[in-house]
Structures are given as structure tokens and as C-alpha cells.
Amino acid sequence: MTRYLLDTNIVLRLSNPFDIQYDLATDAVFNLTAQGHQCVITSQVLIEFWVVATCPARVNGFGWSTEQAKASVEQLLDRFPLLEDRLEFFQLG
């Protein structure tokens, strides 16, 4: 099994059925999991998701309420494992 980190853009598309790339993102995640792979997310992805979800639509956000964004984050956490943030991920050299 290989783990795949879902980028914020993928998570945003999975959460917005009106996005023109919703089907592409959904199919990609489905195909990975059907092949026995695991898709994961990080706290950074959730932070970036929250910013876009709660940002007004007039400035390229979803314009969602905090309650709606929270419900979507909870759905994401139910669906995808959250990788633990560890300092080793950021050490250089």
C-alpha cells in the first residue's frame, strides 16, 4: 500500500460538487483507494481548506459559514487519516 497526500486543491474539489474538476478529483481518489492505496491529509491542508471555504465567494472562496466549513472538515477527517505533524518533516540537510 502506498500513501498519497491529498493536496489542498484536491480536497477543495472533493468538497465542492459544483467545481468543474469535481468528477476528476473524485475519480482519482476512488481509483487510488480501489487499488488498495491510502489517501491522507495534513493539518496544513485543513488550514488552507478552511481559509478558502470561509472566504467570500467574491474573492474566490466558497463563502461558507464556519458551521458548514466545520462540518466539511469533520467529513474529511472521517474519510481520510490525518498525518501527524512532525519536526522531522521540515528539517533541512
Image (cartoon, rainbow, N blue to C red):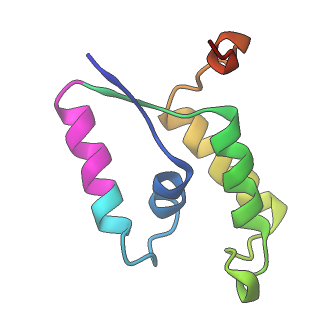
- State the residue at coordinates (74%, 89%): 58
Q: Main secondary structure of the magenta part?
A: helix
Residue ranking furthest to the bottom: 58
- State the residue at coordinates (67%, 80%): 60
Asked whether, in this view, residue 43 is left or right of residue 12, the answer is right
Classify residue 34 by image quadrant: top left
Quarter holding the N terminus is top left
Q: Which of the two residues, 89 or 83, is positioned nearer the viewer here?
A: 89
Asked whether, in this view, residue 65 is left or right of residue 17, the answer is right
Percent of width and height locating residue 90: 68, 21
Residue 38 falls inside the magenta stretch? no
Vertical placement of 55 versus 24: above or below?
below
Magenta part of the chain: 26-36
- State the residue at coordinates (59%, 26%): 82
- State the residue at coordinates (51%, 68%): 16
Vertical placement of 59 versus 49: above or below?
below
Residue 33 falls inside the magenta stretch? yes
Residue ranking furthest to the left: 35
Asked whether, in this view, residue 4 is left or right of residue 83, the answer is left
Classify residue 25 by image quadrant: bottom left
Percent of width and height locating residue 40: 48, 30
Classify residue 3 by image quadrant: top left
Percent of width and height locating residue 66: 83, 61
Residue ranking furthest to the right: 66
Percent of width and height locating residue 93: 62, 12
